[in-house]
Image (cartoon, rainbow, N blue to C red):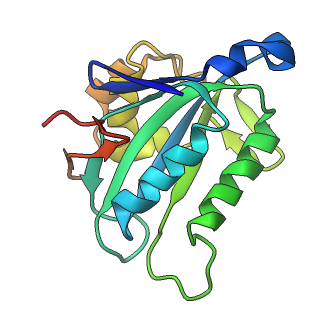
Amino acid sequence: IRLSLVGSEMCIRDRWCRRGDRARMSLSTVYLGLGSNIDREAHLCAGLDALAGILTDMRCSPAFESQAVGIKSGPFINFVVTGQTALPLIELDRRLKFIEADNGRYAPDRKGLPLDIDVLMYDDLHGTFDGLVLPRAEILKNAFVLWPLSLLAPDLVHPGVGKRMAQLWQEAQIDQVLAPVAFEWRGLQLTPA
């Protein structure tokens, strides 16, 4: 795996995915939201390590710290990841649940949220797919999703409202406080100092 930093985004290129049967498979572009409020850096890095095994051409937005929304807990670190996958949507979502479980998400005695990974968008799908609603509503509701998504993919069009992410962020009236926070993975800074 070769890592490189492009602007404020991190790119991962997995050369072996370009050869063999996998290269002939159709790839889908996915956007994932990641967050953690317990041992945040360790769980988020573990999540990125696992995602590097199922995504190619992976890029990450800058990381942001925000207060919890919907639960009483400490502050979160959140960011958005995009990449290509050969996995069908439901299989991708299933694998994300395994990654969360490996990081204690479903432990009965957990306090807070060790790792949360949500499918925000899968290609330009719009609707409900085996109970998974896409694009995810949190894109338009939470600054900790929309701001990093707008930085990572400013020209990406939201299939539900037909506007670019940069425009949605400019027009957003979301009452949440968040700030860029230093975050490093595999020796590279996601958020410039």
Where residue 30 appears, x then y in whole percent? 61, 29
In the picture shown, does residue 22 fall above or below 147? above
**Is 156 positioned to the left or the right of 68 in the image?**
right
In the picture shown, does residue 168 fall above or below 39? above
**Is 138 positioned to the left or the right of 185 in the image?**
right
Q: Quadrant of residue 149?
A: top left
Asked whether residue 45 is in view, the answer is yes
Residue placed farthest to the left in the image?
193
For the point 34% across and 20% down, the residue is 166
Quadrant of the image for the N terminus? top right
Quadrant of the image for the C terminus? top left
In the picture shown, does residue 43 fall above or below 30? below
Q: Quadrant of residue 88?
A: top right
Q: Quadrant of residue 111?
A: bottom left
**Is 82 positioned to the left or the right of 94 in the image?**
left
Where residue 85 appears, x then y in whole percent? 70, 27
Looking at this view, is 97 or 159 the one in front? Answer: 97
For the point 65% across and 66% down, the residue is 101
Where residue 155 appears, x then y in whole percent? 42, 12
For the point 52% across and 51% down, the residue is 47
Residue placed farthest to the right in the image?
21
Where residue 6 appears, x then y in whole percent? 32, 17
